[in-house]
Amino acid sequence: MRALVTGGGGFLGAALARKLRERGDEVRVFGRGSYPDLEAVGIDCAKGDIADYQAVKAACDDRDVVFHVAAKVGLWGPYEEFHEANVEGTKNVLRACQEHGIRKLVFTGSPSVVFHGGDVDGVDESAPYPSKFDSFYSKTKALSERMVLAADHDRLSTVSLRPHFIWGPGDKSILPRVIARRKAGRLFRIGDDNKLVDTIYIDDAVSAHVLAAVQLSPLSEISGKAYFLSGGDPRPIWEFMDRMLAAAGLGPVERRIPKGLAYAAASACEGTWRALGLRSEPPLTKFLVDTLTTSHWFDISAAKRDLGWKPKVKIEEGMARLAHWIKATQGNV
């Protein structure tokens, strides 16, 4: 394949680019930064913003498959920023694919597009988008996924993959935040429940993307569809958090606050941040409280059946690899 990976400097994007290069594919990544570690292994790095159409078009030149991984992810921020990156950015990718005659687009979606503020227990892809979204990220990812799937036709085949809670070596997003909060004594269990959540190890998320690209065509079963991805092994959320902390040599989360108090604190934080016009992320948001106190696990039988994919890395094995990586980087995650 002659592949472009948008968001190639991120956790999933970089891992995907490396795997494609290992396969012998010709790989280019597109992102806002410089990535000498990727260039060192023969990956072409194009610099630009996903909201800049001309930059996206240039990056898509001479490619035959695009992995659109780039997105603005977060619990807080102006809607315009999420819309520009996630919706306008996806429009740019679709337009560039069509103008260049690119035949395959693998989109990295999000399970959050079906979140409705309550428990999500074992749902499959028939679960609808909610009438109201509880985060700008979820809303804009749903809008962009709809565009991608609607664009599927005989000249451009599209598919959306929805991995939930990607983790493992190389994570520079979730893991550092969890570790920093634990070290600062600001990580609390919320409420008395310990809800089940799905997660997926980085290698399994990558393999699903590669398989999707290989299979995608106008006649393929996956064309124009969305698929949930996970390790197929939902665990209590605080058990999983404690395992991540243990991999970093830290003790479990023992402090606890009632859900009602956490929600009130989150409302106060959000109100203060809005009143002061602060652009930084508040220490607590209502969306985060909901995320930590509801179940999120999914039926991945469609991905197994249609992609011929299955998760291979068990949580215990993945945690051992994570601990080794953290030790090798001297805890600098």
Image (cartoon, rainbow, N blue to C red):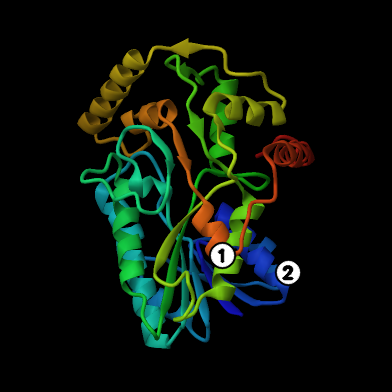
Q: Is residue 113 left or right of residue 332?
A: left
Q: Which quadrant does the N terminus fall into? A: bottom right
Q: Could you tell me which secondary element the residue under label 2 belongs to?
A: helix
Q: Residues within 10 Å of mark 2 (few under 14, many from 20)?
A: few
Above-or-below relation of 233 to 251: below
Q: Residues within 10 Å of mark 1 (few under 14, many from 20)?
A: many
> What amino acid is at disc 2?
Glu
Observer-side mark, 2 or 1, equals 1
Which residue corresponds to the image point at 47% horizontal and 69% vertical from the top-left? 222
Q: Which mark is residue 307?
A: 1
Q: Which quadrant does the C terminus fall into? A: top right
Between the C-alphas of marks 2 and 1, the distance is 21 Å
Residue 64, can we see it?
A: yes
Which residue corresponds to the image point at 62% horizontal and 66% vertical from the top-left? 17
Q: How many marks?
A: 2
Question: x, y percentage for residue 152?
Answer: 36, 75
* Quadrant housing residue 291: top left
Question: x, y percentage for residue 186?
Answer: 50, 19
Q: Could you tell me which secondary element the residue under label 1 belongs to?
A: helix
Above-or-below relation of 315 to 312: above
Residue 9, can we see it?
A: no
Marked residue nearer the N-terminal end (2 or 1): 2
Which residue corresponds to the image point at 50% horizontal and 30% vertical from the top-left? 196
> What amino acid is at disc 1?
Leu
Q: Is residue 135 left or right of residue 221?
A: left
The residue that label 2 is drawn on is: 22
